[in-house]
Image (cartoon, rainbow, N blue to C red):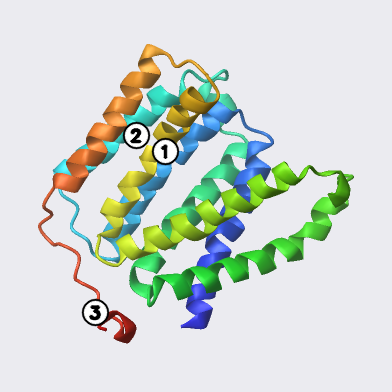
Amino acid sequence: MLPSIGLLGLLNPGWAYTLAMFGLAKTPASVTTLLWAFEPILTLVLAWAFLKERIDRRLIFLVALATFGVVLVGGPTSGSPAAMLNAGSALILAGVLCCAVYTILARNLIADPLFTVAVQQSVALGWMLAIWPLELRSIDPPSIADVPLRDIATVILSGLLYHALAYWLYLRALRSMLASVAGSFFNLIPVFGLTGSFVFLGERLTLLQWLGAALIVGAAMAVLRREPDNPAPRTEALPHERL
C-alpha cells in the first residue's frame, strides 16, 4: 500500500508540477490555461479505459461545455496554433497527464484520506529536495533572513490550504464518486482564479470571460445533479469511521 500511495505523491504534485513549471517558463499563461483544460477530458478517457466507467453522452457534453468555458475564460491567445505546440506546451501536457493518472490511481488506492495525503506529500517533498540542487545551480536564491515574515506566512498558509486541505477534501470525495465525474470539476479552477482576481486584486473581466465562467459553473451544477447509470460503489468504512 505504501509504495502505491507514494506513487501518487510522485505523480501529483511531484512530477506534474515539475513538468508544468518548466513548461510555464516557455509558454504564455493564457495558453497554459487552455492546456490544463485537457485534464477533465483525459480523466474521462482514462476512467473509461482503465476503470471501466460507463460514460454517457450527457457527461461528455457537460465536460465539453465546461472546456469551452475554460477557453473563453483564458481569453484570446497571443500566438498561433503552431506556437502552442512547442516544447513548453508538451511539458505542460505531460504534467496534465500526470494529474489525470493520479485521479485514476487514487480512485482505487484510497484507504484513509488523511493518511494518504500525509504519505503522498512526504514523498513529493522528497522529490522536491532531490531536484532542488539542480535549480540552485541556475539561480542565486535570496537569504531567508531577507524574506519578509508576511511572505513566509503566505507561503505556509497557501501550502496548508492547497497541498493539505484541498487534497484531503478531494480524496474524501473521490471515495464515493466516479473518477470521470470528479475530474470534471477541475474546470472550476479558473473560475475561482478569476473571481479571486476580481475581488482581491481589482482586475476587470471581459464579457466573454464572465460567459465562460457561467458555462463552467452551470456544467458543474449539472454534473452534480446528474444520476449516472453506474453510481460509484460506496467505499467500505474504515474501523475508526464506524465508531
Q: Quadrant of residue 132?
A: bottom right
* Residue of label 1: 37
Residue found at x 56% / y 33% = 85
Q: Are marks 2 and 3 in contact (CB under 8 Å)?
A: no
Within 10 Å of the Cα at label 3, are there few (<14), some (14-19), or many (20+) other Cα atoms? few
Q: Please state which amino acid type lies under the numbered disc 1.
A: Ala
Observer-nearest of 53 and 160: 160
Q: Name the residue at 26% across, 79% down.
A: 237
Residue to which mark 2 is pinned: 67
Seen at 53% across and 71% down, the residue is: 118
Residue 123 location, quadrant = bottom right
Element at badge 1? Answer: loop
Task: Check disc 1: other Cα within 10 Å, few if <14, some if 14-19, many if 20+.
Answer: many
Q: Cα distance, mark 2 to mark 3?
A: 33 Å
Q: Nearer the viewer, mark 2 or mark 3?
A: 3
Please provide percent x and percent y for residue 131: 75, 60
How much space separates mark 2 and mark 1, taking CA atoms? Answer: 6 Å
Question: Going 24% across and 79% down the picture, which residue do you hit?
Answer: 236
Residue at the far front in the pictured view: 149
Q: Which residue is mark 3?
A: 236
Check if mark 3's residue and mark 1's residue have beta carbons within 8 Å. Answer: no
SS under mark 2? helix
Name the secondary structure under disc 3. loop
Question: Between tags 3 and 1, which lies in front?
Answer: 3
Along the horizontal axis of the image, is 9 left or right of 156?
A: left
Residue 156 image offset from top left, x and y in percent: 64, 53
In the picture, measured across the screen, residue 243 lies left or right of residue 170, that is left
**Residue 201 in which image quadrant:** top right
Question: Height in image: 230 above or below 91?
Answer: below
Residue 101: tell me if it is visible.
yes
